[in-house]
Amino acid sequence: MQVSRIHRSNQTFIQLRPHKLILILLLQLSTLWLTACAPQMIAQQPEVGVLPVADNPQLPDVIKSLISQSDKQYINNDFTGALATLERAVRINPRYAEVWSRMAQVYLTLGKVEQARQHAKRSNSVVKDNNKLRDFNNNIIRPDSNLNQKEQTH
Amino acid sequence: MTKQKSKARKKTSKKKKLKKSKARFGFLLNKHFLLGLSVFVLLFSSYLVYLNIQITDKMSGRIWSLPSHVYARPLELYQGKNLTTAQLISELKQIEYIRVQNRPTKPGQYRVLNEAHFEIISRTFTYWDGEQKSQGIRLSIYNNKISILHHLYSDETLPIFRLEPVKIAGIYPSTKEERQLIKLDEVPDDLVLALLAVEDRRFYDHWGIDPRSIIRAMLANVMAGGTVQGGSTLTQQLVKNLFLSPERTLTRKINEALMALLLEISYDKSVILETYINEVYLGQNGAQQIHGFELASQYYFANSLRKIRRDQMALLVGLVKGPSWYDPRRHAERARSRRDQVLILMHERGALSLAQLKKYKSLDLGLAKKPRFSANRYPALVDLVKRQLKQDYNEDDLKSSGLKIFTSIDPLIQTQAEASVKRVITRLEKNNSRAENLQTSLIVASSQQGEIQAMVSDRKPEFPGFNRSLDAVRQIGSLIKPAIYLTALQKPDRYTLASLLDDSPLHIKTSKDKLWSPQNYDKKFSGDILLFDALNKSRNIPTVRLGLDIGLPDISDTLHNLGVNREIPTYPSMTLGAFSLSPYDVANMYQTFAANGFNVPLKVIREVLNKDGLPLKRYPLESEKTIDEKSVYLVNHVLHQVTQTGTARSLTKTFPQSLAGKTGTTDDLRDSWFAGFSDNQLAVVWIGRDDNASTGLTGSSGALRLWSDLFSHLNVDSLEMIQPAGINNVWIDGESGGLSNKNCLGAVELPFIQGSEPTEKAECKSAGFIDQIKRLFN
């Protein structure tokens, strides 16, 4: 990029040629467009690594604590540890869809698609009024999603 | 010249000396002698090598094969958990925590204030997911629930705390023997002192054999006028025990001496002592040999070696010399005087004061009334664990043992189950003239996670015999019906809960000239009956018609989807359960109902760690949706009715909670079954006779009673039946199955799969005022 520096007293300006300016504008516009589109793309395919929100106020402290523990394990790539912690939660009370949903997510990350599906189904069987969670589960259950390919390689 | 001469003289005298010595010891330099000697040395050293190999072979089998330990589930503590003070104390006792009066200061201590407030310091414990360091906690129980859970020394709330699990059993996998192996540092000092005093005073000073003690023993025996002391060392005795040779020939004795020496060369004194303590033969229980002090302590005193009295230890040490001769159960006086001899030796060694000696001599032997048959407290459950292990580990894997096996066994539930069995079986035999020689099986599992919590396979739960829960394959009778109705309801275009079935005489040709005419339990016919009623009241004839209409292969498929892994016969009487399953199979089947169509194959092992505490294998929670939730909801609706108005309605007298289940009775009342579940707990009960004779009990009068007794001692959560989408509740006429409304007489509200609701309206007779009031309260 050709830059000509114009010195004016103590300031330095960088003057750009017109065609370069257009390129930069286009670059910025495309970035904006990508940022706008990204959430839609995530919704189409559950992004491995994104855990469903557990903001249900009815979650008892013991379950919240175990969820938080398993989230930490998950972030540290301790997937079997995360599953073991979530199983502890399910043994204490199997009626919380957030826990089953998380298990589905961990299985998905491990590439165990069938187990992910089954746990997502279990989550749906106990979910009450949480449509966001239901959608998240359905994303995993649906056989016509991009997950079909993963399944074949599994 | 003199110097040379003296030198020459010295040389010749030397030569002469040499010649002289050669003459005397010349034979040593003889070729043949040397050859013979080297051959002998070679042979002897090879023989020693051979002996050494034998020793190390045996010893490595004993030392390196550590027993595997089976653990129960760890008790999870959290605010809101249903737990009573008695249950927590029971658990703490079982993990051998010590109750103290003042504030606990060491791991493994706890105290209780006002029967409700606990202060506990846990021990460090390695779980599957890592080590949990020792921690102090404080908790309070109020209204049979944990109300507070804090760190011990602060007000900081603890959301959850896992208490270390009860150690249930030790498995010696390669030989499948029951052994209670104990480490040397776990052996009470007094026992070691007594043992050495009696059997081998100079154990730490000799090198395998001890000539001095042989002589001393001889003298002592002569003085005493009988054998008081043995002359062989513990090492020699260990060799004897390892090779179990009955002959007392000279060759044997020489071999033993040599091997004792080799043993001492290869192994530390502490290893030899520890192996001895675990190997020494101390008695016989029928076909089972009692080896080792820990098992002997369990066998004679029903208590761990660490917990018995010193006089009891003295008796055990006394048994070493002759377990049959001094058998305390058969020769009490001999045993007593032998014990006293040992006590005297202990006193001489300074372990007991004179006063203590007098006291112990005055005590009775202290034998347990019931010997512990095996070291394992829950033989049926341990059998299940072993079978599950066998599936995944071959013999070689199990040989490198020392495994830590974590299971879902719940000691609190198991204790209740065992108590219920003993109580109810006795009661049933007492109150029913035809009921005698009853046997039973009881399985309790968490229905949503498919984990076995308790299992009883004998009316005497501690008896390690036939495992009825796993192996008693018996006709299931009416327990099949939910599977048949489920299959039908999966075709909503053909069958709904309001479909009319025919309960009139039925004759089926089973072969060329054989006719089968099934009967209802009451030998009556009710004509037209609604489908849900037929299941609720367990009517046989409409069930047979329904089953034959759907097709037996379809029913068989349903059973497989429900989790029954057996071949299902496809002849007409299978519709009345005229085929056999084990109670475990039945539990698997009903688990799928209880989990709303999610089949979770029952299991008992959760995780396995290797001897170094590293994770080896995990058995994750794996479920599969095998039945659609709508049809299973319809069946569960009826199974709930069974416990309200059907064959299990007596449960309403005891339980305000919502439950579901099915009774089962077979021909001639040979088998009494009940499979029932609450929100997250399922239990299957079977009562029958091993000789297959009639029990005089139906499912309701027998198995249901036992189920009810057990659940009345457990925390029962009401069954929460979440109605799935696509189900509508509709009022229909109880007689015709046509559309009705809640104000009509005889109307009943039933769930229907959307689109399958009846369309024809039934005649509506207004329900009387009293009926309407009744309905308000139902």
Image (cartoon, coloured by chain):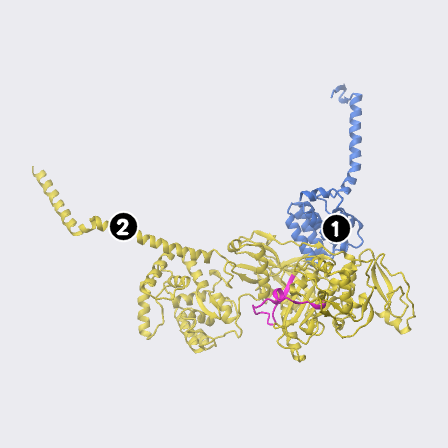
Q: Give the residue furthest to the bottom.
A: B433
**Residue A152 lies in quadrant:** top right
Q: Position of residue B602 (x, y in %)?
A: 65, 59
Dividing the image into 4 quarters, which one contains the C terminus of chain B? Answer: bottom right
Q: Position of residue B698 (x, y in %)?
A: 70, 73
Question: Chain A is which colour?
Answer: blue
Would residue B461 be seen by someone viewing this image from the given angle?
yes
The boundaries of the magenta stretch are: B452-478
Q: In this view, does B287 lie above or below B606?
A: below
Q: Which residue is drawn at 58% across and 51% down?
A: B615
**Residue B349 lies in quadrant:** bottom left
> Which residue was labeled with disc 2?
B38
Residue A81 vs residue B54, the one in the foreground: B54
Local secondary structure at mark 2: helix
> Which residue was labeled with disc 1?
A54
Residue B765 vs residue B235, the one in the foreground: B765
Local secondary structure at mark 1: loop
User: Crowding at label 2, few (<14), some or many (≥20) Cα neighbours within 10 Å?
Assistant: few
